[in-house]
Amino acid sequence: MDIDEILDNFAYLDDWEDKYRYLIDLGRSLEPLPEALHTDAYKVRGCASQVWLETSVEPQQGAGEPVLRFRGDSDAHLVRGLISLLIALFSGRTAEDILATDALALFQRLGLEAHLTPQRSNGLRAMLERVRNDARLALAA
């Protein structure tokens, strides 16, 4: 599912509980990360839940600018939904596009900052920083 479809679906829902359930449903549709990748090398630090994020970097044909693809997993249903949101927003985009995207503004637009616990908000920021750091590393390579 792409980010525009998720945004449209989110806007259609009036009640925060419905939006919460929608995020959980997004997480359920997330392709499971192989158990072999549930290691410290893929773990996202700063999350209250267990979160693993795999990043692959592909050179783009012609321009040579790297394109990043993400897969992730968590032991918490809501967090899996947040990972789905990040993957929809960033996977398949160039490193420069990722770094130019104001994801925090998007999260505020969705109302996530107001409805997530401080721990979940910090975890979401940690996941976002991991994605941005991987984009910076891809550009430097």
Image (tube, rainbow, N blue to C red):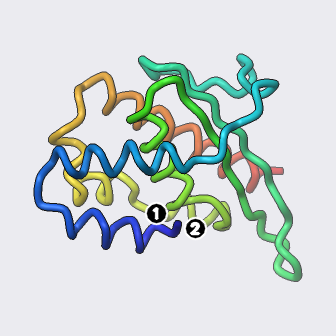
Say left or right for 78 vs 130.
left
Find disc 1 in the rendering and name its residue.
101
Q: Where is 99 relative to 127, above or below?
A: below
Kindly state the secondary structure of the residue where label 1 is placed. Answer: loop
Q: Answer with left or right where residue 85 lies relative to residue 15.
A: right
Q: Is 113 displayed left or right of 90 in the figure?
A: left
Q: In this view, does 125 lie to the left or right of 37?
A: left
Residue drawn where x is 41% and y is 37% of the image: 125
**Label 2 SS:** helix
What amino acid type should be assigned to the residue bearing mark 2? Asp
How many numbered marks, from 0 up?
Answer: 2
Q: Which residue lies furthest to the bottom in this view?
A: 62
Seen from the viewer's position, the closer of residues 69 and 96 is 69
| Crowding near the residue tagged with mark 1, few <14, some 14–19, many ≥20 C-alpha atoms within 10 Å | few
Q: What residue occupies the far left of the structure in this picture?
A: 15
Q: Position of residue 53 (x, y in %)?
A: 64, 36
- Numbered mark located on residue 97 in the image: 2
Q: Nearer the viewer, residue 117 or 67?
A: 117
Residue type indicated by callout 1: Thr
Residue 96 locus on image (x, y percent): 62, 65
Q: For the point 46% across and 20% down, which residue is it?
A: 49
Do labels 2 and 1 touch, CB within 8 Å?
A: yes
Q: In this view, does 5 lie above or below 113?
A: below
Residue drawn where x is 67% and y is 50% of the image: 70
> Which residue shows up at 54% across the image and 20% down it?
50
Find residue 126 and report its horizontal and vertical position in percent.
47, 32
Measure the alpha-carbon separation of dots 2 and 1. 6 Å
> Picture coordinates of residue 60 (x, y %)?
82, 72
